[in-house]
Image (cartoon, rainbow, N blue to C red):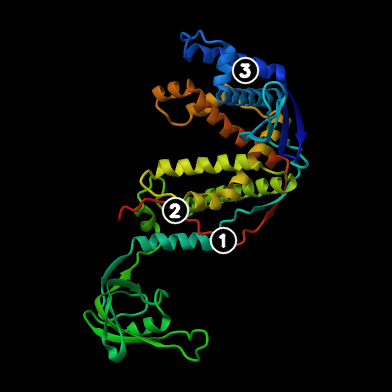
């Protein structure tokens, strides 16, 4: 068997395979020998019929078997001997077979793993968000804690800032109730903007069990000059006001944290927690910016077979997590295609950087991570002897090392975050 590799593009190859007639005749002889052992012809004992007669009587079957066997062997040998990093199942094209007396030819179309040419992976220009905890952020966190310790008491009349529990009936023409448009136990904090501002103003002064009709004007729709008026009958089933504790040492003590007994200690704790979370947030964003920049600087095509394999894994994972759910695989394929291409390109680039920079993870390093993961002693020993688990641990650690390398060799500019994220410190609330 001979073959020739023809390059079509960066990820597609044609294997032009020739199976010589000598090989085809040998295959035919093997098949005839096997067939002769199992067939019976009139006038001959089983296994004793002449080969020529068998060949004549079973010509179509033998031709089919020779064809399939020759294609299979030629295909497998070409795939193996080509030494290509083939990632797809080969597609047979242009098959020419006129019997064992002449050579057979066919083409195997395959996709290969792309050869990665690292154009730029050092000195990647990226931005990193600054980590700054402001007094305003600390004050907001203190206010949130204060709100969580608030108590409520009945109020005589609803005022801005009060909590009102409502039964709301939507009204139609002539202020008649609309069936199916009644909503009970609706809670609103007046002045919070939860409802239309004008509606909340009309609720000011409500007392418990008082009924009141309130109205609101809607924005005109396209083509209309004026909006419509909507009407509601509201009944206040409860009117309450919050009593907030002072932001002082006593509030800090109420948190029940061992090392927090004063307001200053609470502020320090909040600052540390926010700084930790903001640092983690900034590092995550930096990592993603580095990966995006790396992919931009090193473009290459991704084989469709690799994308399909990635999406198939996503589909199988969704089925495992949701065994009773009906999953629309076409929608999954559409939604995860871009993500799949991104993930594959990052995986291949990461592996190339690992090779070029000799980034490795030893068994000892992997064992150390397992030791520190919090498993029981029995589980630690079991996991250390599990090759698949160790491979996943090493893959994660190589990810970390490659990211660390990229950060150490990048041009990083610190910038203010686009908007201040809502970072809060988590503390237990014994009052809950």
Residues tagged 1 and 3 counted as in contact (Cβ below 8 A)? no
Residue 213: image location, x then y, percent: 29, 87
233 w.r.t. 363: above or below:
below
Q: Position of residue 279 (x, y in %)?
A: 57, 49
Q: Which residue in the rendered view is the most extreme toward the left?
A: 209
Which quadrant, please, contains the C terminus?
bottom left
Residue placed most toward the observer, 35 or 276? 35
Reading the image, the residue beneath label 3 is 28
Q: In the figure, is residue 319 to the left or right of 85?
A: left
Q: Residue at x 55, y 27 (%)?
A: 391
* Vertical arrangement, residue 98 with respect to residue 35, above or below: below
Distance (Cα) linking label 2 and label 1 = 21 Å
Residue 361 lies, in percent from the top left, at 61, 27
- 130 or 353, which is in the foreground? 353
Q: Of residues 244 and 85, which is closer to you in this image? A: 85
Left or right, 13 with respect to 196, comes to right
Of circles 2 and 1, the one toward us is 1
Position of the N terminus by quadrant: top right
Secondary structure, mark 3, is helix
At a point 27% along the width and 86% down the height, the residue shown is 212
CB atoms at circles 2 and 1 under 8 Å apart? no
Image spot of residue 363 (x, y percent): 57, 22
- The residue that mark 2 highlights is 266
Residue at position x 66%, y 27% in the image: 79
Between the C-alphas of marks 1 and 3, the distance is 76 Å
Q: Residue 144: in sight, yes or no?
A: yes
Q: Is residue 183 above or below residue 18?
A: below
Location of mark 1 (residue): 420
Can see residue 112?
no
What whole-number distance in Å separates the C-alpha atoms at marks 3 and 2? Answer: 87 Å
Q: Nearer the viewer, residue 209 or 416?
A: 209
- 3 vs 2, front mark: 3
């Amino acid at each position: 068997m001979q073959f020739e590799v023809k390059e079509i593009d960066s990820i597609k190859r044609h294997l032009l395979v020739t199976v010589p007639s000598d090989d085809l005749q040998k295959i035919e002889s093997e098949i005839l020998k096997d067939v002769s052992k199992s067939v019976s012809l009139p006038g001959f004992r089983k296994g004793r019929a002449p080969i020529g007669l068998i060949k004549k009587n079973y010509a179509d079957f033998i031709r089919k078997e020779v064809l399939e066997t020759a294609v299979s062997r030629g295909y497998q040998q070409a795939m193996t001997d080509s030494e290509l990093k083939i990632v797809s199942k080969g597609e047979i094209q242009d098959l020419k077979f006129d019997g064992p007396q002449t050579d057979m030819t066919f083409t195997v179309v395959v996709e290969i793993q792309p050869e990665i040419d690292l154009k730029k992976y050092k000195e990647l220009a990226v931005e990193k968000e600054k980590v700054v905890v402001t007094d305003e952020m600390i004050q907001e966190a203190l206010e949130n804690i204060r709100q969580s310790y608030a108590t409520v008491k009945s109020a005589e009349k609803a005022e801005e800032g009060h909590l009102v529990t409502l039964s709301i009936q939507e009204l139609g023409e002539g202020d008649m109730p609309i069936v199916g448009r009644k909503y009970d136990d609706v809670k609103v904090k007046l002045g919070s903007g939860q409802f239309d501002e004008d509606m909340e103003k009309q609720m000011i002064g409500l007392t418990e069990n008082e009924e009141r009709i309130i109205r609101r004007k809607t924005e005109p729709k396209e083509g209309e000059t004026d909006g419509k008026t909507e009407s509601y009958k509201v009944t206040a089933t409860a009117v309450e006001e919050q009593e907030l504790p002072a932001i002082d040492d006593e509030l800090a003590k109420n948190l029940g944290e061992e090392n927090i007994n004063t307001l200053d200690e609470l502020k320090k704790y909040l600052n540390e927690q926010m700084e930790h979370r903001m640092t983690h947030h900034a590092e995550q964003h930096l990592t993603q910016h580095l990966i995006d920049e790396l992919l931009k600087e090193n473009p290459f095509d991704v084989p469709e077979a690799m994308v399909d394999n990635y999406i198939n894994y996503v589909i199988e994972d969704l089925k495992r997590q949701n065994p009773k759910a009906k999953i629309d695989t076409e929608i999954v394929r559409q939604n995860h295609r871009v993500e799949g291409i991104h993930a594959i390109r990052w995986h291949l680039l990461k592996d190339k950087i690992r090779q070029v920079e000799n980034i490795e993870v030893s068994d000892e390093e992997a064992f150390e991570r397992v030791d520190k993961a919090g498993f029981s002693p029995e589980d630690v020993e079991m996991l250390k002897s599990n090759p698949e688990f160790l491979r996943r641990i090493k893959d994660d650690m190589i990810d970390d090392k490659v990211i660390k390398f990229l950060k150490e060799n990048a041009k990083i500019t610190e910038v203010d975050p686009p908007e201040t994220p809502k970072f809060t410190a988590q503390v237990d609330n014994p009052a809950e």
